[in-house]
Image: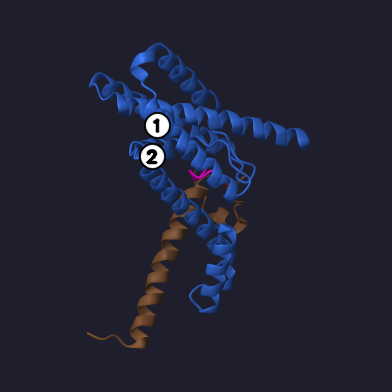
Chain colours: A brown, B blue
Amino acid sequence: MKKNGKEIKEMGSQGLSLINTMAMTIAKKSVNSACSFIHHQPEIPSEMKKFKTTSKK
Amino acid sequence: MIKEWSRKIVSWQINKGILHNQDKEIYEYAYEVSIGQAANILITCFVAFSFQYYMVFLFMLAYIPLRTYAGGFHARNNERCMIFSTAILCAVCIVGKYVLIQRMIPVVILLEVLAVAVVLILSPVEDCNKPLNREEEKKYRKYAYVITFIEIMIAVVFYVLQKQEISKMIMITHIVMAGTLIMGSIKNRNIRKQV
């Protein structure tokens, strides 16, 4: 079945939304741990601190 | 490089109307962390295939949960992080593949005891980019203790079951973890001295 341009565009944006959600899930997990397992810890943006489950410093 | 990629991905999505401009910072952070983790998983696969030593995945399985809550040394940027991670993984493969623990049990047990002591005393070690409050310290220390205890139990069980390769990998994990905790503590002390 051939898909038209609009359908492909919609599928692409849905795929991106899924990737964005996955990235946000990893970031939320990272904020609520001592570190992500990689050896570099990027600075946490202040807006990200709202996802902390413990009280903020 | 990873920071730059995450910026480009987020800017492109903002231009396309998929993300809002006010979420720019958090998504840049999210992509930076995610790409960094994905890169490290790819590096692990590459190292495992290069050395033909797949027990390194077991190392990651034991290392990631402990590292998540115990913290430790962090490189200054993503590039250094990758070099450091690759060096650790190569060292793990070399030790895992070529060192026979059966020939030096007392030394291995002594190293394991020392490594666990370091993990229990020092964890969690925070990073200057992610300072921990009292509540977090307490919580993460507890998690690190529980994970360490579970891993020791698993190592003992597999040692008794004559699956020493698994026990060896868990011990290597604790030794690496102790090393990163000591390095992280020294780094934090030096930063505090400079301030």
Under circle 2, the secondary element is helix
**Residue A34 in view:** no
Query: At 62% across and 42% down in the image, what residue appears?
Result: B131
Locate residue A46, reporting x and y percent.
62, 56
Query: At 40% across and 25% down in the image, what residue appears?
Result: B171
Q: Residues within 10 Å of mark 1 (few under 14, many from 20)?
A: some
Q: Amino acid at mark 1?
A: Ile
Q: Amino acid at mark 2?
A: Phe
**Mark 1 highlights which residue?**
B147
- Foreground residue, B44 or B51? B51
On whether residue B38 falls in the magenta region, the answer is no
Under circle 1, the secondary element is helix
- In the displayed structure, B125 sits above or below B105; it is below
Q: Is residue B164 left or right of residue A39?
A: left
* Quarter holding residue B183: top right
- Foreground residue, A31 or B159? B159
Label 1 lies in what chain?
B
Q: Residues within 10 Å of mark 2 (few under 14, many from 20)?
A: few
- Foreground residue, B164 or A27? B164
Label 2 lies in what chain?
B
Tell me, for residue B51, which label it has, or none.
2
Q: Nearer the viewer, mark 2 or mark 1?
A: 2
Could you tell me what secondary structure mostly forms the magenta stretch? Answer: loop
Read off the magenta span: A34-40
Locate residue A48, reporting x and y percent.
56, 56
Q: Is residue B122 left or right of residue B42?
A: right
